[in-house]
């Protein structure tokens, strides 16, 4: 059972959702590990920021011990994973007070097949951290969440993830699905994931791998659910595996505005890699411990339920 928790990357994204859920659960003390302190962020979120130098393992270790942090949850960004995740894990192992660790996996198991992983730079670092954790005395659990439903229901539903249009452009009633669209894809809603992470802190034992997802449908079925809930027909096309392997996808109407922040070729390469993962079944999460079995009082909302809830808030 955990007592004092630190969330790396807890000021934004899934990390912030986890911090908020721990605060709402009101059973554990939680800090946010950050490279910079922020009084504004502390006031907004309600948790104290601890400034950390992720490049210095001894600095991290000292910080963990000084604040008696027994549990570290990593929700570092994809870029930070390659730079800092291993140092955080090593420092947690060296710490005299830290006993539990959740690595920043939050997706699928790595490494997947090399042809799939190569465009995604965070795959190898995640695999390396998992290999390291297996050699330690830390009680760890890698959470496999599949893809995030947030990209299809937020806004209007609450989420701290950045807005991305991924394969289904609901606002413009258009979709370009990877491959056949007939392969199951597990998806989870970050606000629900966060509640289960908070709940798991009270469990006496963790499994090495934890599965959680709100729904698992084929992409064709996800489109069908959107059409039925919204009462609108989606203009549907499919991108072949050959196209995806070339690093390309069909551009959707919501993509060009994103190019102001992320170059088109980067978006194309990134999403085509996920398209390959979808079509080759990497997101069809199957075997493993489902956290719902350990926390039966907590509930997960289906994709259709979340869409319907979102419709009511428009």
Image (spheres, rainbow, N blue to C red):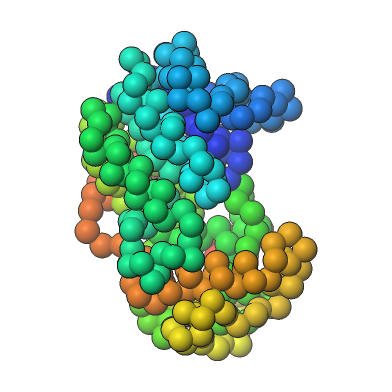
Left or right of 99 in this view: 67: right
* Residue at 49 percent of width and 66 percent of height: 119
| Residue found at x 41% / y 48% | 125
Residue 54 x/y as whole percent = 53, 30
- Is residue 102 or residue 80 the one in the foreground? 80
Residue placed most toward the observer, 299 or 179: 179
- Residue 140: which quarter of the image? top left
Question: Is 177 left, or right, of 283 in this rendering?
Answer: right
Task: Report x, y in % for residue 61.
Answer: 43, 19
Q: Quadrant of the C terminus?
A: bottom right
| Residue at 28% over, 44% down | 131
Image coords of residue 68 (percent x, y) = 42, 13
Residue drawn at the location 66% of the way across and 24% of the way down: 37
Answer above or below: position of 64 versus 17. Answer: above
Snapshot quadrant of residue 95: top left
Dividing the image into 4 quarters, which one contains the N terminus?
A: top left
> Residue 251 occupies which quadrant of the picture?
bottom right
Can residue 53 be seen here? The reply is yes
**Residue 166, image x, y percentages:** 57, 69
Left or right: where 38 falls relative to 99: right
- Name the one closer to the observer, 257 or 314: 257
Q: Is residue 25 above or below residue 245?
A: above
Note whether 288 is above or below 247 in the view shown.
Answer: above
| Side of 267 where 101 appears, left or right | left
């Amino acid at each position: 059972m955990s007592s004092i928790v630190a969330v790396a990357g807890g000021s934004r994204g899934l990390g912030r959702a986890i911090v908020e859920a721990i605060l709402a659960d009101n059973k554990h003390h939680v800090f946010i590990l950050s490279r910079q302190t922020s009084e504004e962020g502390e006031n907004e979120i309600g948790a104290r920021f601890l400034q950390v130098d992720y490049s210095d393992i001894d600095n991290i270790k000292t910080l963990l011990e000084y604040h008696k942090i027994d549990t570290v949850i990593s929700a570092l960004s994809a870029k930070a994973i390659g730079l800092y995740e291993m140092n955080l894990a090593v420092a947690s192992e060296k710490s005299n007070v830290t006993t539990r660790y959740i690595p920043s996996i939050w997706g699928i198991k790595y490494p997947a097949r090399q042809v799939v992983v190569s465009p995604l730079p965070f795959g190898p670092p995640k695999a390396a951290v998992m290999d390291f954790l297996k050699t330690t005395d830390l009680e760890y659990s890698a959470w496999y969440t599949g893809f995030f439903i947030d990209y299809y229901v937020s806004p209007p539903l609450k989420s701290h993830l950045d807005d991305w249009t991924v394969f289904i452009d609901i606002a413009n009633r258009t979709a370009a699905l990877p491959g056949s669209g007939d392969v199951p894809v597990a998806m989870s809603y970050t606000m629900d994931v966060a509640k289960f992470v908070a709940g798991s802190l009270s469990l006496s034992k963790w499994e090495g791998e934890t599965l959680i997802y709100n729904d698992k449908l084929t992409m064709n079925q996800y489109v069908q659910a959107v059409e039925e809930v919204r009462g609108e027909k989606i203009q549907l096309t499919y991108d072949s595996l050959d196209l995806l392997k070339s690093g390309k996808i069909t551009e959707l109407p919501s993509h060009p505005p994103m190019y102001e922040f992320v170059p088109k070729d980067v978006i194309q390469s990134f999403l085509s890699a996920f398209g390959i993962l979808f079509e080759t079944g990497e997101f069809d999460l199957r075997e493993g411990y489902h956290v719902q079995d350990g926390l039966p009082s907590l509930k997960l909302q289906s994709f259709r339920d979340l869409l319907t809830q979102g419709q009511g808030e428009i």
